[in-house]
Image (cartoon, rainbow, N blue to C red):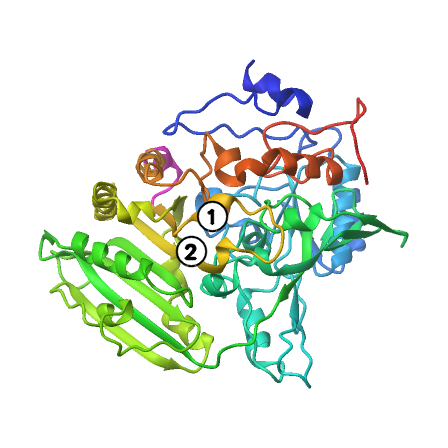
């Protein structure tokens, strides 16, 4: 059976019938059958004008002068041309847009604030619901002001940045609190949470998904759903309310992907801070005066970082860029580590003491601060751009999850370090490799709630994300992607089979197992419960490889 034939069949017949793709070949994107520009079913100008009249936000179409800047993405190669962009400023705007899309049988995508590497929210001819202006201002923090022992919760809208959330949580409540989140401006609150959400505090408090208490989403049928542990309360456009006993939808939002509904708000657990923190940062050359010296440096740093207690979080960045100062120097190894609580920096023989006193000739700088006053001080010392891949116009991002055996198996460790040294060998002078190893483990392995986070992420010691970035245009895209996919193939050979969905490559032959582990079939049943026609579609999301279309035949639909 070919893959196209599989697209046209019902879920029960086609779940595993997708054609195999070799690791170094592009994965086909199977677009949903919907109404696109040029078709007789597509909305006319009068319809779009009527849509605009019902919104507090705005509608942008290709003929508008604001259209190019509205659809341009940080990863330029994923800039697409949606037929209609709805910039939502209220939850009702999202509901109105979803109902409009259903009326005209349009493909629906959405995006929040932050960087989108894989084009999940940008598709030609679709209705794009832009959530970046859907903000709760100020972010709502619920804390018992008379009991400092009650951590409380925080509620934010999909357009709020993590930076806006941090600002309210850490200083705006009367009592400072902590929340598990991502980069202040570059990580989207919605997709970061729904794909797991590995942050600096995760080894102490768990993933962002593990701390999601409740959510509000606009469902694919246009109803607004308040999703809680054990129940889903839905309200239609006429104000009719129904409550269902359902514990699975919230769990799906906790790490099961991004197409369960259009997220409009999230409520997270807060934590009482320790009020004493520490941090350490270091920087070393990979190539020093023409000699590759970074391999032993990275070996030492990763081994020390891997042995840190769980109060520590952070990342190691390996970047292949040329030095701005010395012609024969290339590449850097940097680490930024954060201690959520007191740590004795002077105790001889500990990993932090070892890092402070590690002084090869390749060392550029090291800064140890044992007495930080706040989490925000650490964030200001750990540049967002260093952890991400948008310095150059175009990027191809990929990930693998590394277990501790990579470091304990001498042969495997040596081969892995050799691959990391290859970041200095970018294909052209206009391109660059960067890899970022984020610390995992700790509380990630034992969540407080049920979730659909891939078990492979819970088992990992590091989440290893790499990217090839380049500045040239579309004419050379295939060349760079082929280079990046070859690097991806080598990197995944060291992994445990899993991939962090937030940084997943767009080309994964084993995407169901790599992203969703053994939970894919359960997630597919949840998808059928809440979006049986697969309106909310994204590449490599649950049900993206075929069409859940029950218009012409009976399908189970419980809600």
User: How many numbered marks, from 0 up?
Assistant: 2
- Horizontal side of residue 288 vs 452, given as left or right: left
Measure how far apart labels 1 and 2 are at the Cα level: 8 Å
Q: Which residue shows up at 68% across the image and 23% down it?
A: 12
Q: Is residue 201 left or right of residue 141?
A: left
Asked if the residues shown at circle 1 and circle 2 are in contact, with their CB atoms under 8 angstroms apart, the answer is: yes
Report the disc number at residue 245.
Answer: none
Whether residue 391 is visible here, answered yes or no, is no
* Residue 202 visible in the picture: yes
Residue hosting label 2: 440
Mark 1 or 2 closer to N-term?
Answer: 2
Which of the two residues, 156 or 36, is positioned nearer the viewer here?
A: 156
Quadrant hosting residue 303: bottom left
Label 1: few (<14), some or many (≥20) within 10 Å? many
Residue 155 image position (x, y, % from top left): 67, 67
Q: Nearer the viewer, residue 200 or 72?
A: 200
Residue 74: x and y, percent? Answer: 46, 52
Q: Is residue 515 above or below residue 241?
A: above
The N terminus lies in quadrant? top right
Q: Helix, strand, or loop for circle 2?
A: loop
Q: Is residue 21 one of those drawn in magenta? A: no
Vertically, is 333 above or below 171? above
Q: Secondary structure at mark 1?
A: helix
Q: Quadrant of the C terminus?
A: top right
Q: Which residue position holds label 1?
A: 457
Magenta region: 472-479
Residue at x 39% of width, y 70% of height: 338
Q: Residue at x 36, y 72 (%)?
A: 381
User: In percent of the image, x 13 and y 61: which residue is there?
Assistant: 326
| Dominant SS type (magenta) | helix
């Amino acid at each position: 059976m070919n893959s196209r034939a599989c697209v046209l069949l019902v879920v029960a017949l086609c779940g595993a019938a997708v054609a195999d793709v070799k690791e170094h070949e592009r994965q086909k994107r199977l677009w949903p059958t919907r109404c696109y520009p040029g078709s007789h079913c597509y909305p006319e100008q009068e319809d779009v004008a009527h849509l605009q009249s019902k919104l507090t936000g705005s509608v942008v179409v290709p003929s508008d002068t604001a259209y190019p800047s509205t659809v341009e993405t940080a990863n330029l190669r994923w800039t697409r041309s949606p037929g209609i962009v709805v910039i939502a400023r209220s939850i009702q705007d999202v509901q109105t847009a979803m109902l409009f899309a259903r009326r005209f049988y349009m493909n629906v995508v959405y995006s929040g604030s932050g960087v989108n590497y894989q084009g999940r929210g940008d598709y030609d001819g679709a209705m794009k619901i832009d959530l970046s202006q859907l903000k709760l201002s100020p972010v709502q923090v619920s804390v018992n002001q008379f009991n400092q022992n009650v951590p409380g919760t925080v509620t934010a809208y999909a357009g709020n940045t993590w930076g806006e959330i941090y600002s309210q949580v850490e200083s705006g409540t009367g009592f400072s609190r902590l929340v598990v989140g991502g980069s202040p401006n570059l990580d989207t609150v919605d997709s970061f949470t729904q794909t797991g959400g590995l942050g600096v505090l995760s080894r102490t408090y768990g993933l962002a998904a593990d701390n999601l208490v409740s959510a509000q989403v606009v469902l694919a049928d246009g109803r607004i759903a308040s999703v809680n542990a054990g129940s889903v309360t839905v309200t239609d456009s006429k104000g009719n309310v129904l409550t269902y006993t359902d514990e699975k939808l919230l769990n799906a939002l906790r790490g099961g992907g991004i197409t369960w509904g259009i997220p409009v708000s999230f409520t997270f657990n807060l934590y009482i801070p320790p009020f004493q923190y520490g941090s350490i940062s270091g920087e070393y050359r990979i190539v020093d005066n023409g000699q590759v010296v970074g391999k032993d440096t990275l070996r030492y740093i990763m081994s020390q970082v891997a042995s840190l207690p769980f109060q520590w979080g952070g990342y190691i960045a390996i970047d292949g860029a040329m030095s701005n100062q010395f012609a024969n120097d290339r590449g850097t190894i940097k680490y930024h580590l954060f201690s959520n609580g007191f740590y004795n920096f002077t105790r001889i023989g500990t990993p932090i003491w070892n890092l402070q006193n590690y002084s090869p000739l390749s060392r550029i700088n090291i800064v140890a601060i044992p007495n930080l006053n706040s989490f925000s001080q650490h964030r200001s010392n750990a540049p967002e751009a260093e952890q991400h891949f948008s310095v150059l116009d175009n990027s191809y991002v990929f990930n693998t999850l590394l277990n501790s055996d990579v470091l304990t198996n001498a042969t495997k460790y040596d081969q892995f370090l050799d691959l990391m040294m290859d970041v200095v060998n970018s294909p052209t002078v206009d391109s660059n490799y960067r890899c970022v190893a984020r610390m995992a483990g700790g509380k990630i392995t034992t969540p407080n709630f049920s979730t659909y986070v891939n078990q492979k992420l819970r088992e990992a010691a590091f989440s290893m994300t790499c990217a090839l970035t380049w500045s040239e245009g579309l004419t050379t895209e295939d060349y760079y992607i082929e280079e990046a996919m070859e690097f991806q193939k080598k990197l995944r050979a060291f992994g445990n089979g899993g991939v962090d969905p937030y940084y997943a490559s767009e080309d994964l032959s084993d995407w169901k197992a790599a992203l969703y582990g053994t939970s894919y079939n359960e997630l597919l049943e949840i998808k059928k419960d809440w979006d049986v026609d697969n309106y909310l579609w994204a590449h490599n999301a649950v049900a993206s490889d075929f069409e859940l279309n029950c218009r012409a035949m009976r399908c189970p639909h419980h809600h």
